[in-house]
Amino acid sequence: MTRVFNFSAGPGTLPEEVLLQAADEMLDWHGSGQSVMEMSHRGKNFISIAEQAEADLRTLLAVPDGYHVLFLQGGASLQFEMIPMNLIQGRNVADYINTGEWAKKAINAAKALADVNVAASAEDRSFSYVPDPSEWQVSENAAYLHYTANETIGGVEFGWIPDVGDVPVVSDMSSNLLSRPLDVSRLGLIYAGAQKNIGPAGLALVIVREDLVGIGEPAPPAMLDYATHAKARSMYNTPPTFAVYVAGLVFQWLLENGGLDAAEERNVAKAKLLYDFIDSSEFYLNPVEVADRSRMNVPFRLADSALEADFLAGAAKNDLVELKGHRSVGGMRASLYNAMPIEGVQALVDYMADFAATKG
């Protein structure tokens, strides 16, 4: 069997070791005689899986005391609504930084539930940069400030955490959580869909400071209330059990391979390899400001866009798949999540060089 190099923005590639372990345990988890997918989420076997996954995630991120870790459903998109419902008290304004398509989705969802102030936007330059904090127009009494840490479509990433004083900082980290060390204590709430660096689609992680739970006015419905899920330890209803299990295997894989410091080193090396090649070529270009380039998602164009279909077809023949850019922007996009080995990036660079030499 030949494994392709999967550059999809999500669901993204998973570590081969994790897939092999999940396959090995598919019919019989640890001598239980059953698959994780068949287990009661109230039973001691699955509870041990969930507790270990939470403990390993807390270790990876050095999550301080005073934070809940929640395993939820609905993906990051449901969080676009849950955040204003849970963090807005009355009609307090919420500040948002608009750096691309996912930030825009979060903003539009929040507008139906809260007074939203777009404190800064990069739309003036086609979302190719992160606005300088000195130019942000933040509110005086914001309930929170929201930013999208990494834009998968535009390939723009915050390399830092905003500092807005006592205002809680909320971040969508769907596509770069666990790709580098993170000071969780500087954020009030982190959320992430799993299908990039964490595990299968269907799971969302929420890490929320305890004082931000149970303050929504009016109180959200039970299933949309963080307090409900915190009290029930993410077991208020049946959780996405298999997704939690695989995420736990990914956490173990990261811990066994040097933790987030080592993950960052690998990710820096992969991104440098690809960006250096693009920058050295007249055949390819990347539109993002160098300082704000994403390590996770690298969009690029060909100097002659008419060759894009040929490029993608040739890439697929070389087992380099899911390189087509998002439909809203076109071009190409290579996603370099944790599980993408540097050999995959080298294979892509080699193919790009050959294609340019042939077609340029």
Image (cartoon, rainbow, N blue to C red):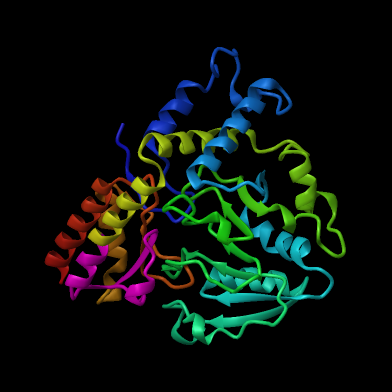
Instruction: Please say if 214 is above or below 198.
Output: below
Q: How many labels does the image show?
A: 0
Left or right: residue 320 compared with residue 126: left
- Taking the spot 70% from the left edge, 69% from the top edge, the residue there is 109
Q: Position of residue 320 (x, y in %)?
A: 30, 51
Position of residue 141 measured from the top left corner of the image (x, y, whole percent): 72, 78
**304 and 341: which is toward the camera:** 341
Name which residue lies at 65% across and 38% down: 240
Residue 122 visible in this rendered orientation of the protein: no
| Quarter containing the N terminus | top left
Image height of 82 relative to 233, above or below = below
- At horizontal 68% and vertical 70% (from top left) the residue drawn is 144
Q: Which of 355 and 109 is in front in this view?
A: 109
Is residue 355 inside the magenta stretch? no
Snapshot quadrant of residue 302: bottom left
Q: Depth check: 221 or 327 in front?
A: 221
Quarter of the picture containing the C terminus is: bottom left
Q: In which quarter of the image is residue 171?
A: bottom right
Instruction: Give the residues in magenta.
Output: 274-301
Q: Residue at x 71, y 62 (%)?
A: 83
Is 282 magenta? The answer is yes
Relative image position of residue 76 (x, y in whole percent): 62, 56
Q: Where is residue 186 in the image (x, y as percent from the top left)?
A: 56, 61
Task: Tell which residue pokes out farthest to the right in this image.
Answer: 218
Which residue is nearer to you in this view: 94 or 340? 94
Residue 18 falls left or right of residue 310 = right
The answer to whether residue 348 shows anywhere in this view is yes
